[in-house]
Image (cartoon, rainbow, N blue to C red):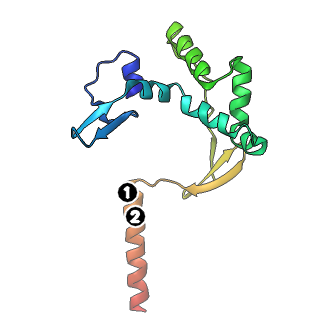
Amino acid sequence: MPNCLDGGLNIPHNTRKYFGSEYDEETKKYQYFPDAHRDRIFGCHIDEHMSQLKDNKDDFQRQFSNWSKTLKDAKVDSVKALFTKIHAAVRANPERAAGAKKTKTAQKYDNAARTVIVTKNGKYTRDRKLTLDQRKANLQKKINDAIARNTE
């Protein structure tokens, strides 16, 4: 919801749910600290954690290698600067770019009860959905088979 509010939508809400809201025991009320909330939105906590791990190269690479690459590609030095740049770009052009359309997987039917799904990773089978009449017929067949077995 904070993103909707940042976008200008008027949504009735309470700031108690946001980061930066703390309960004060003395006044028995919640206090809201907007600076803490803003820092969280802009990823300052990620910057702090990155700076703590910079001493240990292995841990930093394992946890933040993609972040480092993204920061380098965006030509910024911190996550806060990256998020500021992203927010500015969204405000400049709020229209969503059309992504690549997903192609449907080919479905081939072996018989009436099984469906073969072909994907880029291989193929698998699954049970095909039956209509109500088909389910009733299957049930009646099972009942008839059970009766026939009991009469023998």
Residue 97 in view (yes/no): no
- Tell me which corner region of the image, top left, top right, bottom left or bottom right, holds residue 114: bottom right
Considering every residue shown, the one lying at the far right of the view is 57
Q: Give yes or no for contact between labels 1 and 2 (Cβ–Cβ under 8 Å).
A: yes
Q: Which residue position holds label 1?
A: 133
- Tell me which corner region of the image, top left, top right, bottom left or bottom right, holds residue 18: top left
Mark linked to residue 137: 2
Considering every residue shown, the one lying at the far front of the view is 26
Vertical placement of residue 44 versus 133, above or below: above
- Tell me which corner region of the image, top left, top right, bottom left or bottom right, holds residue 12: top left
Q: Secondary structure at mark 2?
A: helix
Could you tell me which quadrant the C terminus lies in? bottom left
Q: Amino acid at mark 1?
A: Asp
Nearest the eye: 136 or 92: 92
- Compared across the picture, whether 77 is left or right of 13 comes to right
Q: Amino acid at mark 2?
A: Ala
Mark linked to residue 36: none
Vertical placement of residue 132 versus 65, above or below: below
Q: CA distance from mark 1 to mark 2?
A: 6 Å
Residue 122, how many percent across, how many down? 72, 49
Nearest the eye: 54 or 144: 54
Name the residue rendered at 27%, 31% in the picture.
Answer: 14
Name the residue rendered at 67%, 46% in the picture.
Answer: 118
- Compared across the picture, whether 136 is left or right of 73 comes to left
